[in-house]
Amino acid sequence: MTPYSPDPDWWKSATGYQIYPRSFACSNGDGIGDIPGIIGKLDYLADLGIGFIWLSPVFSSPQADNGYDISDYQDIAPEFGTLADMDRLILEAKARGIGIVMDLVVNHSSDEHHWFRSALQGREVPYRDFYIWRDPVNGGAPNDQQSYFGGSAWEYDRASGQFYLHLFDKKQPDLNWQNPSLRRAIYQMMNWWLDRGIAGFRMDVIDLIGKDPDAQIFADAPDLHPFLREMHEATLKGRNVVTVGEAWSATPAGALLYSGRDAGELSMVFQFEHVSQQWDPVIGKWAPKPFDLVALKRVFNRWQAATAQDGWNSLFWGNHDLPRAVSKYGDGSEDSAKMLAIVLHLMKGTPYIYQGEEIGMTNAAFSAITQFRDVETVNFYAIRTAKGMDPQAFIQGANENGRDNARTPMQWTSGTQAGFTTGTPWIEVNPNHTAINAKAAQSKPDGVFATYKSLAHLRKSHPIIVAGTYTPLLEYHPKVVAYLRKHQGQCLAVIANFTGDPVTFDPNLTLQGDSLIATHTARTALNGPLTLAPHEAFAILG
């Protein structure tokens, strides 16, 4: 089986859409989203105009980290459905011109995976070396490496007298990519899924697989790119699929190592420089820095420049690990949601919509730690408050940057539980679903949904959006984003007011053309000083 499009670059003109299955659509009333629920919403996604779904993990899992702890890579968690449901999703999506991109989580597995259970049986068993084990040092952990979820990254196994590495939760032991047998098993699994007709993989924390734990080099280690090239040769080469690697360590200087046309690795990476530059350098995301538009533009422009001639960008505001875009970068209003969409989707790269972004869903604003479900948030609440951080200050930071903001249920209607489930949802529904929901959004001809739908269709019909060059304008303006795209004699000007106040400025640009898209009044000309309404954005094609 092959993906839905014969064009090898189909993913450049497509719009991606991330589904967090637990929170998308519940078909059976148990309060947990599932695959049949997703199938029931495929027409909605086809209407939106998306080209592929990035599906967060639906594999068998004890759900210590909501599915990012996999116990069987070739089966489906019963709360999400069955393998037959998964096959039906692939086929039903393909019938609508939509590819399914699976989440490949192979930096670590669950401690309930049969590989790890076998590894616990002794130091000499074959699967022992599928994981990373070290002897104690001075009676304690091998080194002081910390888990990204808080605490030591080493867990002691009393039976064998050794520690195993877990860069995330202790129920997520790291896989040992130095073992060729482990790599072969992963490649076999990837080919098994590709042969079932999926359109590719999003690769979870893929920049960690080359790690050298003894040297405490974890991200972007020397073996990373050789492993990715080997993976490509063993699984991806010759297949018409898309791959995107989550790489928090990725830099513009190294972008082409991943996605260059001759790199033989990935289609693109998710990089997070625009996210982390807004965090406190010591406390991290729990203490957000004030929003700085100039710094944000600097990051976007640097990445656009790095991939100007080769490689490819992924464009996104949010995902399942990040706050809601309209709350983080806007003010929660429809106008700011539309502005954010226009600014991002008309850059060069493949844009991704995180579920609910297309209707303007906002952050959750919980008031107590008991409302949170995310293991990272709960762990760090205990760590930070034990060190003296005010509990309410932590919750304020979590409400701005915490992962559960993106995980509240999809708001389908204004009715009970937002139409997500007939039962009790696994995490609370945002009370503002009575005003912000898909049914209401679809009824507005100039609303947020209509803007995202227009953008998805425009990139399919205007080559300049896909292939045009990118030139930033007004790089140091603290309130305005502006850039040009040029291709085959055409020029596309994109201008946006990132603030809730009117702004007057001179773009120093003369252009006459057609209004491609606008949040407010359609504009067809630029010539001299310009006044933008709050959160106004527009694009002129001349």
Image (cartoon, helix red, strand yellow):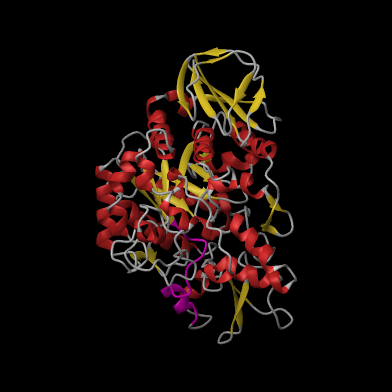
Does residue 166 show up?
Answer: no
Residue 261 image point, x, y percent: 50, 35
Q: In front: 532, or 355?
A: 532
- Residue 513 position (above or below residue 255): above
Q: In front: 393, or 217?
A: 393
Query: Magenta segment: does it hold 453?
Result: no
Q: Residue 29's quadrant in the figure?
A: bottom left
Does residue 387 show up?
Answer: yes
Q: In front: 12, or 255?
A: 12
Query: Magenta segment: does it hold 109?
Result: yes
Residue 332 image point, x, y percent: 54, 45
Residue 170 image point, x, y percent: 56, 73
How many labels, in total?
0
Q: Residue 60's quadrant in the figure?
A: bottom left
Q: Which residue is drawn at 35% across and 52% down?
A: 413
Q: Is residue 489 left or right of residue 89?
A: right
Q: Which residue is drawn at 71% across and 60% down?
A: 283
Residue 378 image point, x, y percent: 58, 70
Numbered range of the magenta stretch: 104-120
- Residue projecting furthest to the bottom: 159
- Residue 402 position (above or below residue 456): below
Q: In front: 421, or 170?
A: 421
Q: Residue 506's quadrant in the figure?
A: top right
